[in-house]
Image (spheres, rainbow, N blue to C red):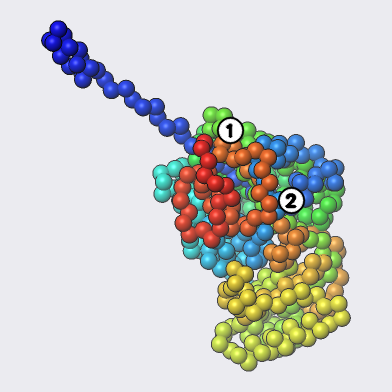
C-alpha cells in the first residue's frame, strides 16, 4: 500500500502542470478626432434637427464630457498635441499651427514634425510598452515613433497634388501607403480637407485596424472645420457635414471592434468649437502704423521690432529683442489705443506671466484675445477694424464656451451613460492611457475614471 501511494505521488509529479489561463488582452484604443465639433451638436442634436445615430449611440452606451475646455490657443495643432500628451502647449512645444516666421521665409510651414514635441505622447508610451500603434493624418506625426503612420503633411494648397502624394509616401511608414492604396484606393494627399477626403481617409483607418490590428490608433477628420470656416456654425452645410461624418464614425467604430474581436475602446474627440464672426481686427496693421513693422513695395515685411503671431480669436505679440523695453512700451501703447476704440474688439490682453499661467505662447510679450464676434487678421492694410462676411472662427480664449470641445468614449472599462461634466483637455490623454494600460506620468491632467476591472 505504501508503494502504491508513492507511485501515485510520483505520477502526480510527472504530470504536466495545469497552465493558468492567459490574461485577456486589453481591447484596442481608437481615437477619432473631428476637428471643430462642438458639444451642442451632439448633446442638443434635436435643436438642430440632426440625424446622428452613431454619435447618439456613443452617448447612450458610453461616457461623455458635457464640455471639454481647451488650451491657449484654441487651434488645431496645439490642441491635438494636448490630446495625446496631457500637457499644455507651453510644455509640449507646439504653440500654434504655423511656426513663428515673421519674414515668411518658411513658406507657411506648420508644426508638422514630431521632433518638435518636448514631452512623450500616447504613442511613445504605447511603443515603450511593446504595443503596435497606428495613425491616419493625425497632426504633428512626421517622423513620429508610430508603427504604422500615414502623416499629415502638404506643401501645396492643391488637393491630390502629385508631388504631395510622393511626399506622403516618403514621410509615412515605408511601403505603407503603397500597400494600403492597393487595397482601398488612392489616398487624399495635399491640402485635401473636406468630407469627401475624410470619407477616403476613413477607409484607410478601417484597413489599418483590420490588417495591422494596432493597440492604439489615431484618426483625424477635418471636413467639418473647413465647412465651419466657410459657412459658419449652424449653417445647413455645416449640419449636412456633421450627418455625413456621423456615418464615418460608425464605420471606424465597427472596424475597431472587429479588430479587437468584438471589444474596443472607441473615443470621439475634438479640438475646439467655433464662434460666428463678422468683424476683424488687423493687429499687425496697428503695429505697422506705430513703426514696429517695415514693409517692402509689395506689402511684405522686411524688418520688425514687434509682430503678431496667429490669427483667429487670439494672437501672440512677439518682440524681436525680448529685452527691448522701449518696444514693449510702444506695443502696450498700441494696445491701449485699440482698446479705447468705440466698440473695441479686444476682450483681454494677457501679459507674459498670465500667458504662461494659461499654458500658451510662453515667449510672447502680450497675448491679445478678441471678442467672440471678432477675429484677428494678419493683413496689413487699413482699416484697423472692419466688417467681414459672417463665418466660423476659433482661437478665442479657452473659457469662451463657443470654443468648447467634445469627448465621447465607449468600451470595456467605461461606465455607460455617465456624464463626466466639464473636463480639461489635459484630462483626455491620461484617461486614454489608463484605458490602454500604459503610464503617462508627465500629464498635467488626470484620468476621469477610477480604475475599473475590464
- Give the labeled residue for mark 2: 39
Q: Residue at x 82, y 67 (%)?
A: 373
> Tag 2's secondary structure?
helix
Tag on residue 204? none
In the rendered image, the residue lying farthest to the front is 1
Which percent across, then down, holds residue 372?
A: 79, 66
Residue 424: name its quadrant.
Answer: bottom right
Residue 412 shows up from this direction: yes
Number of the label disc, if any, that sits on residue 257: 1
- Is disc 1 placed on a helix, strand or loop? helix
Where the N terminus falls, by quadrant? Answer: top left
* In the rendered image, the vertical position of residue 372 relative to residue 249, given as above or below: below
Marks 2 and 1, how far apart at CA: 25 Å
Residue 153 in sight in this render: no
Determine whether 99 is above or below 449 in the image: below
Q: Which of the 4 quarters of the picture holds residue 20? A: top left
Total number of numbered discs in the rendering = 2
Which residue is at 78% across, 86% downward?
337
Q: x and y percent of residue 24 in the render?
A: 46, 32
Relative placement, left or right, of 453 versus 406 is left
Q: Nearer the viewer, residue 260 or 176?
A: 260
Decide if residue 378 is on the left or right side of residue 278: left
Amino acid at each position: 500500500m505504501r508503494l502504491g501511494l508513492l507511485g501515485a505521488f510520483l505520477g502526480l509529479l510527472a504530470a504536466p502542470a495545469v497552465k493558468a489561463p492567459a490574461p485577456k488582452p486589453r481591447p484596442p484604443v481608437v481615437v477619432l478626432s473631428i476637428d471643430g465639433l462642438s458639444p451642442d451638436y451632439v448633446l442638443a442634436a434635436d435643436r438642430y434637427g440632426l440625424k446622428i445615430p452613431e454619435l447618439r449611440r456613443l452617448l447612450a452606451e458610453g461616457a461623455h464630457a458635457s464640455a471639454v475646455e481647451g488650451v491657449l490657443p484654441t487651434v488645431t495643432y496645439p490642441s491635438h498635441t494636448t490630446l495625446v500628451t496631457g500637457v499644455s502647449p507651453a510644455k509640449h512645444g507646439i504653440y500654434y499651427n504655423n511656426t513663428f516666421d515673421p519674414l515668411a521665409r518658411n513658406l507657411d510651414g506648420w508644426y508638422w514634425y514630431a521632433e518638435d514635441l518636448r514631452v512623450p505622447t500616447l504613442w511613445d508610451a504605447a511603443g515603450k510598452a511593446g504595443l503596435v500603434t497606428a495613425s491616419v493624418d493625425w497632426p504633428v506625426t512626421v517622423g513620429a515613433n508610430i508603427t504604422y503612420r500615414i502623416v499629415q503633411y502638404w506643401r501645396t494648397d492643391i488637393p491630390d497634388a502629385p508631388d504631395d502624394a510622393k511626399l506622403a509616401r516618403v514621410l509615412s511608414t515605408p511601403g505603407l501607403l503603397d500597400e494600403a492604396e492597393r487595397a482601398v484606393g488612392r489616398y487624399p494627399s495635399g491640402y485635401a480637407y473636406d468630407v469627401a477626403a475624410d470619407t477616403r481617409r476613413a477607409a484607410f483607418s478601417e484597413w489599418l485596424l483590420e490588417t495591422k490590428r494596432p493597440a492604439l490608433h489615431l484618426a483625424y477628420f477635418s471636413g467639418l472645420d473647413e465647412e465651419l470656416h466657410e459657412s459658419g456654425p449652424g449653417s445647413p452645410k455645416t449640419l449636412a457635414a456633421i450627418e455625413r461624418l456621423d456615418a464615418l464614425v460608425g464605420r471606424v467604430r465597427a472596424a475597431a471592434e472587429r479588430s479587437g474581436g468584438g471589444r474596443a475602446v472607441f473615443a470621439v474627440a475634438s479640438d475646439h468649437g467655433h464662434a460666428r464672426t463678422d468683424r476683424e481686427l488687423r493687429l499687425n496693421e496697428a503695429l505697422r502704423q506705430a513703426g514696429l513693422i517695415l514693409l517692402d513695395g509689395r506689402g511684405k515685411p522686411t524688418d520688425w521690432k514687434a509682430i503678431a503671431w496667429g490669427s483667429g480669436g487670439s494672437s501672440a505679440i512677439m518682440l524681436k529683442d525680448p529685452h527691448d523695453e522701449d518696444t514693449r512700451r510702444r506695443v502696450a501703447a498700441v494696445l491701449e489705443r485699440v482698446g479705447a476704440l468705440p466698440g473695441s474688439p479686444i476682450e483681454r490682453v494677457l501679459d507674459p506671466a498670465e500667458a504662461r499661467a494659461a499654458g500658451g505662447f510662453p515667449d510672447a510679450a502680450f497675448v491679445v484675445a478678441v471678442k467672440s464676434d471678432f477675429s484677428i487678421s494678419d493683413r496689413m492694410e487699413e482699416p484697423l477694424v472692419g466688417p467681414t462676411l459672417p463665418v466660423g472662427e476659433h482661437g478665442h480664449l479657452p473659457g469662451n464656451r463657443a470654443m468648447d470641445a467634445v469627448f465621447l468614449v465607449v468600451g470595456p472599462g467605461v461606465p455607460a451613460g455617465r456624464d463626466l461634466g466639464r473636463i480639461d483637455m489635459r484630462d483626455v490623454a491620461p484617461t486614454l492611457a489608463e484605458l490602454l494600460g500604459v503610464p503617462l506620468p508627465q500629464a498635467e491632467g488626470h484620468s476621469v475614471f477610477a480604475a475599473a476591472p475590464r
